[in-house]
Each structure stands twice: as structure tokens, then as C-alpha cells.
Amino acid sequence: MATTRTLKSPVTVEEITSSELYGILLKARGESAALDSRVVLQKLFAAEDYYERDLRIRFGRKRVFSDVWGRQNGSFEDASLTLPDDFDELDDIDEPAYDYRSDFFTDGRWGRIQLNYRPVWSISQMVFTFPGTGTVFTVPTSWIRLDRKYGNVQLVPATGEAILAVFTHFIVMRAIGSRGSLPMSIYVDYTTGFSHEELCQHHNELLEGLRLRTLLSLAGIISAVAAPGGGSSNSLGLDGLSRSRSFGGKFGPYSGKFEIAMEQEEAIRDNWKMREQGIPLAFA
């Protein structure tokens, strides 16, 4: 069945097929005919999806909404929990609401959450819900402090004492009644994702990782590789690009190229997780 999907990243099929490693793949296969461009495109689609899930990022600006199914089918009557008219089930992101925890409002911090996707460009709203009551409290935007790079959200009350007192009583009494935890009770709607311009200007390492993963995935479908000096066939099962399956010099002068590409692709993802995602917040 033909796909109508378009690429989410700036990487193109032409970039893949004009690369040195692609030419090496054809040589290793023992023939000069290029692969069908549709095959290359599908592998590039797969690389994009893998990077988005593995790194918890999105290519292109994306809106994130908490508990879409519950808001579409639940009993919430508050207008703040109504999804926008232009909500798109295929393009927008649906994620579970966040748990309220007993230490969310301790040590004067007024709560801290690390959102699931980074970076976070803006928060359209943050709402506390209370299961079984239908009652909600919408956090004033002036209270929200956001670390965009790591997706950390902290609340700093900045309005009158009367509102603060009501909100404190509202939260604390229900937290006590539920032994310090209200599961899936905090709804956060926000915007995440990198535009093409941002990727090209600041994150070329991600684009290089996409190219390498696509090329290595193409190696996985080339089942017969003619090694110099012999006619043996070898399966290149590169599912997950596991380093436990080494080329081990079996493919003559091409072995080093494959090994280096695998190491570079893995290093790009590892470096991103260490430097760009931040240390996940942990609660006792």
C-alpha cells in the first residue's frame, strides 16, 4: 500500500544515496545497481521514528496533551480540559497525566515535574484534577517556572495570599486523604520539538545519526555480501544495531567502515541522552 507520509527531518533520500557508506554497501554486495529509492525512504522513516522514541524528542513543533482519551470520553465539564478544535490525533501527542506525589509541595519548592518530552518551548496550561470529584484547579501561568532544555517545571506562587491559601488547603487535604498521592491528576499541555531550522543550525549530530542509522539499516537488508577472496554469504542482522554482532573483519577492507559507523551512531545517541536530556528527577 502506498504511503502518504512525508519526512519529519531535513535528511533526504539523496543525502543517503550520495554518501560514501552507501557506495561501500553496493560494493560489498558485489553489484553496482542502486537500491530502489522507496526502500531507502522506508528505512529513513524507521530511523526517524526510532530517534524520536529513543531520545524522547520530536522532529518539528508538536503539541502534547495529557490524557486525550479521558478528555474525549470522561465527565470533565471544565472548559480548561476541552481539547482545541484543531486537535489532530495523528499529529498531536497524547500522553498520560502526571502523578501528584507527597513531596510535590515540600521544602518551599512548590513542586517540580520533569515532563516526558524535551525541549519544552511553552506550556499552554497546567491543571490539577481530582478523581471522582470532577473539580479542577488551573495553575496561573505566572506561577509556572520552566527549564526549557530539560523540561523541568516548578511552581512559584506569585498571586495573592487568599488564592494561595485556598490552593494549599485544596491540594494538601486531598493528598492526605489519598495517602500522599493522586495518580494521574496533573494535566500539562505544552509544545515540544525541533524545527528544521533548529536542527540544521544547532543539532547536526542528530541528523548525522539519522543518516548513519538509515545506512546501517540498509546493510541489514542486503543479505548476501561477497567478501574479497571468497564467495561466502553472511547475514547482517542489524536489528537494533546491536554491537554484539560485529563484522569481525569478515568483509575485508569494508569491515572497519561498518564498525566505525556503528560506533559513531551509538555515540551520538548516548551523548544526546547524557548532555541534552538531563538527569531524571527521582522521588522517594
Image (spheres, rainbow, N blue to C red):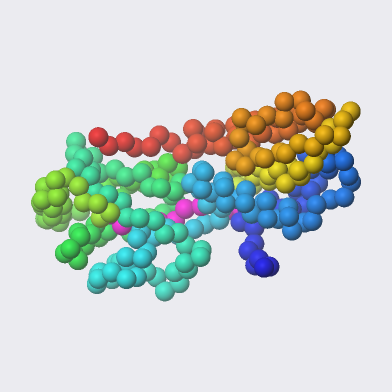
Between 232 and 83, the one lying in front of the other is 232
Which quarter of the image is occupied by the C terminus?
A: top left
Look at the image and tell me in which quarter the N terminus lies: bottom right
Position of residue 283 measured from the top left corner of the image (x, y, whole percent)? 27, 37
Q: Position of residue 193 (x, y in %)?
A: 51, 52
Residue closer to the observer: 89 or 189: 89
Quarter location, residue 84: bottom left
Can residue 124 be seen in this snapshot?
A: no
**Figure quadrant of residue 227:** top right
Number of on-image labels: 0
Task: Name the residue at 70% across, 43% down.
Answer: 220
User: Which residue ends up furthest to the front in the rendered image?
Assistant: 232
Residue drawn 87% across the image and 50% down it: 33
**Residue at position x 32%, y 67% in the image:** 71
Q: Is residue 281 above or below residue 79?
A: above
51 lies left or right of 113:
right
Q: Magenta segment, principal secondary structure?
A: strand
Look at the picture and state if 176 lies above or below 258. Answer: below
Q: Return the x and y of residue 53 as percentages of the image width and height.
A: 51, 48
Q: Is residue 194 magenta?
A: yes
- In the image, the segment drawn in magenta is 186-196
Is residue 140 part of the magenta span, yes or no?
Answer: no
On the picture, is 243 further left or further right than 16? left
